[in-house]
């Protein structure tokens, strides 16, 4: 029976493994932290510090520890330290990991043999649901814990437990990325956040508390879950008036705002940096965002289950926030892929002891990056995030067709407003389209022919012409979706 957990939730050396075992790729050193000294900023900073101290949520210690990691050797030592702590805690406090670690001989007499780390079974969503009770740490009530859940983009959302220590490390890793990669103090910078998650809208929407928090963090929060023509007109007006240094938002929402600005010949303020989150940033959308906003867009990768995972540098590589999550990129055989090869993203969060996620298959695909990035960061790299596993189509023989193949079929179509490609079955594809004008028959036939090139000549193609394509409950827009994976 599932543990009864109150919904209110809040209560109170020498390396023993080789570098080959973990295959970390990180070199160089981080840049200096920028300083901002305006009067208004100093007042907000002081108030924030007082409030955080009262709440016990300061992350100065975590940020200082991250900033002290200036070499690859130090990064390896950091991960060894926190992996061992996590594994020992999970062994002693969760039934599931105690049984699993005992079976593979990972823990002996209070010592952890990290050379056996890759023997830990992958934690899938199905396993998580089946052994939910056994994954909750028996000491979670002694931590400031809370419930969270995944977006459930294509299936049943996962519900899990996190705590304030996990949250502090996640924020510290994120702030370090903004400072070292973008040269921005994220907390003090004027920012506009274009977001679409209902839970975040409720948290950061109207109300005295939300208003105060947004003022303290110099933030304007715009609801991307609803974006009518009038909404987008008002959003651009607010952006132009506030002149933020940073704009952050869902990739699809930012893209729609850019299309509106072009369509209405409206200028948008150019921030110091534009950060694209939550959805895959393909070349077409990147080009549009940078063209309209007149600034570089940086991709940022995060998840509900494990928080901040990776962020892009000025050279275009995604740097893993390795002080918060340990990442593996595995092939279909569960072996690490080589540089430049796509694989499944497997995440071990280093700091959530209330409900450990160890070797968790998050459901995303990524290409492993090179061993060294010219930007100078010590953090390991990914070449790019290629999207959700469910965004890729699969044939009956196991051949995987990248979702990007289908999105490119609809590039630069004047008659198109929006689309969604859905794999209903191995030999059945549904194309959902919102038209902006009449679709030429020749282009319809060309799209169908290209679908059959990869899915087979006997593939059944269905067209649905609709007025609107709804977003997911978490506010995301899915361009491709495979029900076979689900």
Image: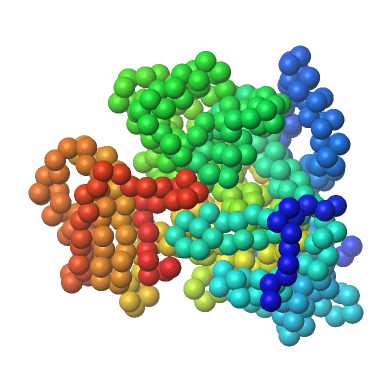
**Colour scheme in use:** rainbow
Q: Is residue 259 left or right of residue 339?
A: left
In-front residue for pair 436/347:
436
Q: Is residue 357 above or below residue 294?
A: below
Residue 111 in sight in this render:
yes
* Residue drawn at point x = 50 percent, y = 49 percent: 474
* Residue drawn at point x = 61 percent, y = 35 percent: 204
Residue 290 coordinates in the image, percent (x, y):
44, 31
Q: Is residue 235 above or below residue 299?
A: above
Residue 350 in sight in this render:
no
Quarter-of-image position of residue 427: bottom left
Furthest-left residue in this view: 441
Which part of the image, by quadrant, shows the N terminus?
Answer: bottom right
Quarter-of-image position of residue 42: top right
Total marks drawn?
0
Quarter-of-image position of residue 59: top right
In-front residue for pair 314/184:
184
Residue 252 coordinates in the image, percent (x, y):
42, 41
Which part of the image, by quadrant, shows the C terminus?
Answer: bottom left
In-front residue for pair 221/310:
221
Residue 286 coordinates in the image, percent (x, y):
42, 38
* Residue drawn at point x = 53 percent, y = 24 percent: 271
* Residue drawn at point x = 22 percent, y = 42 percent: 435
Residue 170 coordinates in the image, percent (x, y):
71, 48
């Amino acid at each position: 029976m599932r543990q009864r957990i109150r919904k209110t939730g809040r209560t109170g050396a020498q390396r023993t493994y080789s570098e080959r075992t973990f295959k970390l790729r990180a070199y160089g050193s981080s840049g200096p932290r920028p300083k901002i000294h305006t009067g208004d900023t100093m007042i907000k900073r002081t108030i924030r510090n007082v409030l955080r101290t009262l709440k016990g949520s300061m992350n100065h210690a975590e940020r200082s520890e991250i900033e002290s990691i200036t070499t690859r050797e130090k990064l390896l030592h950091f991960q060894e330290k926190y992996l061992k702590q996590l594994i020992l805690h999970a062994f002693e406090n969760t039934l599931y990991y105690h049984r699993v670690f005992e079976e593979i001989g990972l823990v002996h007499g209070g010592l952890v043999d990290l050379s056996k780390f890759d023997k830990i079974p992958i934690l899938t969503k199905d396993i998580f649901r089946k052994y939910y009770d056994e994954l909750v740490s028996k000491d979670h009530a002694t931590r400031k814990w809370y419930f969270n859940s995944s977006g459930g983009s294509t299936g049943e959302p996962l519900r899990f437990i996190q705590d304030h220590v996990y949250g502090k490390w996640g924020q510290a890793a994120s702030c370090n990325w903004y400072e070292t990669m973008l040269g921005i103090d994220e907390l003090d910078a004027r920012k506009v956040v274009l977001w679409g998650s209902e839970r975040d809208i409720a948290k950061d929407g109207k109300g005295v508390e939300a208003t105060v928090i947004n003022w303290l963090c110099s933030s304007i929060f715009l609801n991307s879950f609803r974006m009518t023509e009038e909404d987008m007109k008002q959003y651009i007006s607010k952006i132009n008036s506030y002149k933020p240094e940073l704009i952050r938002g869902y990739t699809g929402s930012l893209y729609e705002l850019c299309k509106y600005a072009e369509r209405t010949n409206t200028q948008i303020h150019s921030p110091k940096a534009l950060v694209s989150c939550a959805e895959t940033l393909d070349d077409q959308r990147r080009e549009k965002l940078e063209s309209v906003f007149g600034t570089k867009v940086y991709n940022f990768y995060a998840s509900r289950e494990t928080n901040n995972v990776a962020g892009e540098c000025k050279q275009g590589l995604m740097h893993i926030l390795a002080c918060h999550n340990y990442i593996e990129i595995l092939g279909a055989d569960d072996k690490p892929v080589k540089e430049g090869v796509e694989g499944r993203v497997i995440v071990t969060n280093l700091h959530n002891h209330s409900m450990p996620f160890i070797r968790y298959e998050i459901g995303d695909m990524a290409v492993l990056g090179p061993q060294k990035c010219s930007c100078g960061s010590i953090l390991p790299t990914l070449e790019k995030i290629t999207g959700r596993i469910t965004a890729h189509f699969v044939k009956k023989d196991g051949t995987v067709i990248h979702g990007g193949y289908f999105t490119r079929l609809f590039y630069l179509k004047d008659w198109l407003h929006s689309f969604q490609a859905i794999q209903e079955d191995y030999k059945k594809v549904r194309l959902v389209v919102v038209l902006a004008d009449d679709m030429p028959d020749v282009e319809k036939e060309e799209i169908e022919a290209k679908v059959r090139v990869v899915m087979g000549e006997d593939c059944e193609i269905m067209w649905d012409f609709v007025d609107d394509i709804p977003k997911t409950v978490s506010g995301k827009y899915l361009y491709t979706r495979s029900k076979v994976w689900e």
